[in-house]
Image (tube, rainbow, N blue to C red):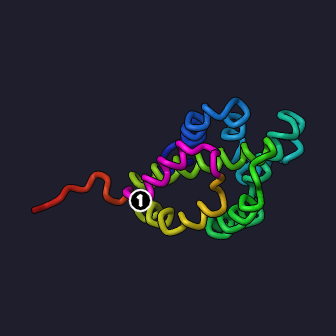
């Protein structure tokens, strides 16, 4: 579940955002949580989807850590080492950016405390994942959401 909604709705939103980045990006969107959240093994993804997709999914997986904070720290460490020139690295960086945007946008509406956490962790996330020229439109939207997200929907009283 994703809050009170089936998790596939979240994956579908991430996939829709990643559509301009190609079919492989869309596939990785759907597979990104499989290793962490199911009994699926990486070799199964490799045999079904090939090396590029499997490597991209592996960069997005942090199953060894139970709590969200340690997963995020480990994932940021992993993603910060990727240059984005290799296709699997590019896919992982694009999908994580799309995933972060969808998560942050949903949390702003449904989970304000979680959104505040996304905002406080944003500089670290951006340092780890942003690569110039890679999904700039999503980054622009994510930057804007992080900057003004807490003000959206508020009314001024004079």
Q: Which residue is mark 1?
A: 147
Indicate yes or no whether the magenta region holds residue 133: yes
Closer-to-camera residue (126/116): 126
**In the figure, is residue 151 to the left or right of 127?**
left
Q: Quadrant of the C terminus?
A: bottom left
Badge 1: residue crowd in 10 Å (few <14, some 14–19, many ≥20): few
State the residue in front, 9 or 99: 99
> Which residues lie in the magenta part?
132-148
Instruction: Give the left or right position of residue 77, taking residue 97 as reference.
Output: right
Between 53 and 7, the one nearer to me in the picture = 53
Q: Is residue 91 left or right of residue 7?
A: right
Q: Which quarter of the figure has residue 73?
A: bottom right
Residue 75, horizontal then vertical, whole percent? 70, 61
Disc 1 secondary structure class: helix
Q: In x, y percent, where is residue 78?
A: 75, 61
Q: Residue at x 48, y 54 (%)?
A: 143
Residue 36's x, y, as percent? 73, 54
Asked whether residue 33 appears in the rendered view, the answer is no
Residue 67 or residue 122, whichever sits in front: 122
Picture coordinates of residue 71 (x, y %)?
A: 68, 64
Q: Chief secondary structure of the magenta span?
A: helix
* Residue at image location 71% in from the left, 35% down from the top: 27
């Amino acid at each position: 579940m994703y809050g009170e909604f089936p998790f596939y709705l979240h994956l579908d939103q991430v996939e829709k955002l990643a559509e301009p980045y190609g079919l492989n990006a869309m596939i990785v969107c759907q597979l990104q949580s499989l290793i962490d959240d199911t009994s699926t093994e990486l070799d199964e993804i490799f045999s079904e989807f090939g090396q590029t997709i499997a490597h991209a999914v592996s960069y997005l997986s942090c199953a060894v850590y139970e709590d969200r904070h340690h997963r995020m720290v480990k994932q940021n460490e992993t993603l910060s080492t990727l240059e984005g020139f290799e296709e699997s690295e590019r896919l992982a960086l694009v999908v994580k950016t799309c995933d972060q945007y969808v998560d942050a946008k949903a949390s702003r509406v449904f989970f304000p405390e979680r959104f505040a956490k996304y905002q406080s962790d944003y500089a670290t996330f951006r340092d780890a994942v942003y690569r110039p020229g890679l999904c700039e439109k999503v980054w622009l939207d994510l930057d804007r959401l992080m900057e003004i997200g807490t003000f959206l929907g508020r009314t001024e009283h004079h």
